[in-house]
Image (cartoon, rainbow, N blue to C red):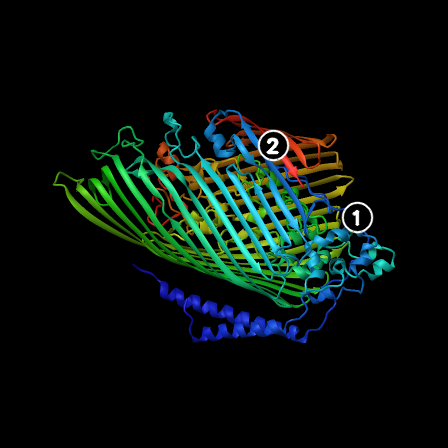
Amino acid sequence: MIMNVRSHKRASASRTQVWMAVLALVLIVSTVPALLAQSSSSGESNPGVAGVSADQNPNSADGAQGSQAAAPAKPAATDGSSLGPYTFHSQFEVGYRFASRVGGNDQMYRSQVNLYEGARLFNSYMSLRSTPGVGLFDRFDLSLNNLGDPYGTARLNVSRSDLYDLRASYRDMNYYHFISTFDNQLLGQGNTFSQHNLNTDYRNTDVELRLFPTHRIVPFVGYSRSTSTGPGFTTVESTGNEFLLQTQWRYAADEYRGGVQFNLSTLNLTVEEGYRFLKNDTMITSAGQPQGNENNPVYLGTPITLTSLNGGYHGRVKLPTSRILAKFTPFQNLRMTARYSYTMGDVDSDMGEIRTGSFVDLNDFLAYSTAADGFNGRAKSPNHNGALLVEYLPFSRLKLTDNVDVLDYHVSGAGLLSTLYLNASSIFGPGPSSSKTVTDLLNTQFAYSQVRNQAEAELDLGHGFAVRAGHRYTYVKVDSDDSEDVNSVDAAVNTAIVGMVYRPGSWLRLGLDFENNTTNRAITRTDLFDYDSLNLDWRIGSWKGFSASGRFTARHNSDPASDISYKARDHNYSASLNYDPSERISIGLDYSLADLFSDMLIVVPQNLQETSSIFNERYSGIGGRIALTVYRGTKVELGYRGIINRGTFPIDYHQPYASFWIPLGSSKLAFKPAWQYYRYIQKLGTLENYQTNLVTLSLVYSR
Amino acid sequence: MTLNRGSKFLVLSFVAVLAIAALAGNLKGLPAGAQAQQSGTTMQDCAACHEELVKAFNINTHDILEKSPSYKVANPCESCHGSGKAHIEGGGDKTKIITFKGKSTAGTYNQQCLTCHKKDHEVTGFNASTHARQGLFCADCHSIHKPAPMTRSLKDRASNLCMSCHTLQRAQFSKPFHHRVKENAMECTDCHQPHSGIDAKQVSKSFSGQEVCFKCHSEKQGPFVFEHPAINLRGCQGCHEPHGSNNPKLLNRTAMTSLCLECHSRSLTATTVIQSQPPAFHNLNSPTYQNCTTCHVMIHGSNFDRFFLK
């Protein structure tokens, strides 16, 4: 087993010494202003210019999911109840969803929407505030969303401003994937059972505690856990025949981290250490289809069948990580931000598998009935990732920035496969059956380095108008060696950048960016090679209740190499209008249009003929919403969101909705019925179309 | 990683300098710039005209400026709005105070906030971020006096604010396959860092410096003995559209064949392109070979098979 660990350790240690020396120098310099402790004037002079006084009203909650996505109403500054020293706000929405039977393909509905009938706790929260620095906490926020649905979340934020800040979140998401027309080689035979399907639960927990957040030294600890578990089906291939397998996913990742943040007068430094531990304990078993997918599974006179298969993974990956973040402002007109992280990945994975049936192995020219595999994969992977941003303002109206980021990633590993064949005989002729053990060792090296530098100058021309110009240089080097294929390639990319922004006041913002890119060679065929990119975005702030925003992006890419011949365009137009003339009426409209086109030469494997791979998507998205307060606080909201997609994969997707808010006696309790409709239509076939109605009846208690 | 003598010296020097710097630092908790804006007025002077705001400020996070021994500011209003003396003497002249509403550059208004908040761990070079370069004010998203509940002084839920400008992404989240942002199960800030100036497209990185996707999709993280170079070269976006897609699994292409073959096709003239041509028995006329992951199941990387079969 060849591992180049020692030389990597030496290189890593020397890099670390350089970074430590740089940091020490920065710290020494940073103490000078602190020691002098001169009071200085404020960073920028007051603008002192009158202008249009207009707050920007945010768009109201997008109700595309009906009651589920409606945001809680914002309380006025003096709303809420008193609870001792605390001001207490809360809102709880509990209810029941009725779901009609899904018309059409239930599996597709479940893979996309996945909402069914039952009691639910919808968007709910509880918030307590007190005078900062009083009691055990001066801030307590708890939110619970979609409990009972396949994407429930909980967030907790408890803090006392000068003592601690605790943030925690939990998310339980179900990822269901069963799509008959996707990755299904049996569809042409009329079999709609997708052999690659999953019913996976992703659970994510994240907790972080910071102590003394307003002090100069802020220690913190954090813990995250991410699991993905659940059953599914997959396949295994053997000499041109595929066999269905049942799989039980079992992945888990635990991450422990801790560090200290130092807040000095001109330097903010965060030093962090952590450890991430990944585990894979997935199991696989045969699913009782010994003939596989082929109708007559015979290879070289040997029938290819799978009677039984049992296997399991035992994968372990360790990722200790060190991370530093520094923000340094030695002078008022010079700011630096630097970040560096180092990870040394350690992979130690095993897999065992026993299969019985009838097989042919073309590597060892054997026909056999039973095999026991033992796989072992080991690898080391150092990863250096650093970024440095320097902002310099030689004059008040001129800003120069330079942003460098470096990524250096290497994997050195080996895979050892040991197979015991039972009842094995040569495929070249008759002979006695016997047992045989075969061992294969494959070494692998993969190295990826990237350096990117972006330098820009921005000039403030006054009256809210600023222009900027810059250049980005990217160098990428890849070395890949797995004992049979060797690839080594590097590329240099130059990108010119120009842009402007016009913001005469809060009421209008206009931004324009243009990039032009040239590359000396492509690393992969689908790289952005020679491209132009234009972005225009605009926003009109609230004027008599009216606000609007929009965006236009266009990107054209091409690679003229005669056997790549890659042409691509990506145009997107989107606009959003909102009209909120009073508290009684709110109207929102949005429209988006996308035109994606990609044409590239590809080589068909069976005859090495060239053909075009063309992908085209012309997409229109429409959304509209009207909300009215009709009588004694009763509110009605009607809305629609739909997309129409044409091109390679034409679909229609319609989502109208309606919701009501009916106060029940007091201002604290309301009845909230809602209706949501989903209709999904594929234009090239009806197999996966569906439609369904959801009706939700809920009670909302606000305090 | 073991440290040699030289490295140990560096570590000790580092710690010593930190200790000196911590002790020698400005004893006042508030940055010097913000401290200098105190003009001798008090909050009660402001309450004469802004009574409701001052009353509500009692439970505002920023009241820590007045209440905490670390700051002990006489008038926290001036820490953000600048000196109020001329404003009061001018009878409430709006030109004599920072309103965060009038005509000014983003740099001017934002500097008021960044004077203190530049130390926040989420703020990494905000002035060089896309948001700042596009002229966004902190006050475009944040509301100190009327924050939305359950937010960090935001005007509304984070994703609602983001999508009020990022209308294209709002449309993408309406596609059939999408990350659950509109369902309130995720926020834009779970993947993006809106205050970052050092991350491309303000996309966060995971703790180990890799794609933020691996925070949740840890089974794809690796490293793997047999890496799929596309992931390192193009990132997850090489194959997936993270916001929303009409294609299953958020893929960029409907047919998996075209997605894979666009890279895995032999190029003779462009010889430095990383490539591997599928073998001739991969007959695309057969349904078996029209879906690459039928066999290549561990497409994100494998610890056991260089062709990602296991």
Q: Could you tell me how far apart the alpha carbons at marks 2 and 1 are, in whole angstroms?
A: 40 Å
The percent position of residue B30, horizontal first and vertical second, equals: 69, 65
Image quarter of the N terminus of chain B: bottom left
In the image, farthest residue toward the left: A432
User: Dot 1: few (<14), some (14–19), or many (≥20) neighbours within 10 Å?
Assistant: some
Between A114 and A648, which is closer to the camera in this rendering? Answer: A114
In the image, residue B185 above or below residue A222 = above
Q: Are marks 2 and 1 in contact (CB under 8 Å)?
A: no
What residue is rendered at 39% in x and 50% in y?
Answer: A279
The percent position of residue B27, horizontal first and vertical second, equals: 66, 71
User: Dot 2: few (<14), some (14–19), or many (≥20) neighbours within 10 Å?
Assistant: many
The percent position of residue A124, horizontal first and vertical second, equals: 60, 41
Name the amino acid type tagged 1: Ser
**Is residue A400 something that shows in the picture?**
yes
Question: Which residue is the site of mark 2?
Answer: A698
Name the amino acid type tagged 2: Ser
The percent position of residue A446, horizontal first and vertical second, equals: 39, 55
Marked residue chain, label 2: A
In the image, residue A333 above or below residue A283 = below
Return the mark for residue A53.
1
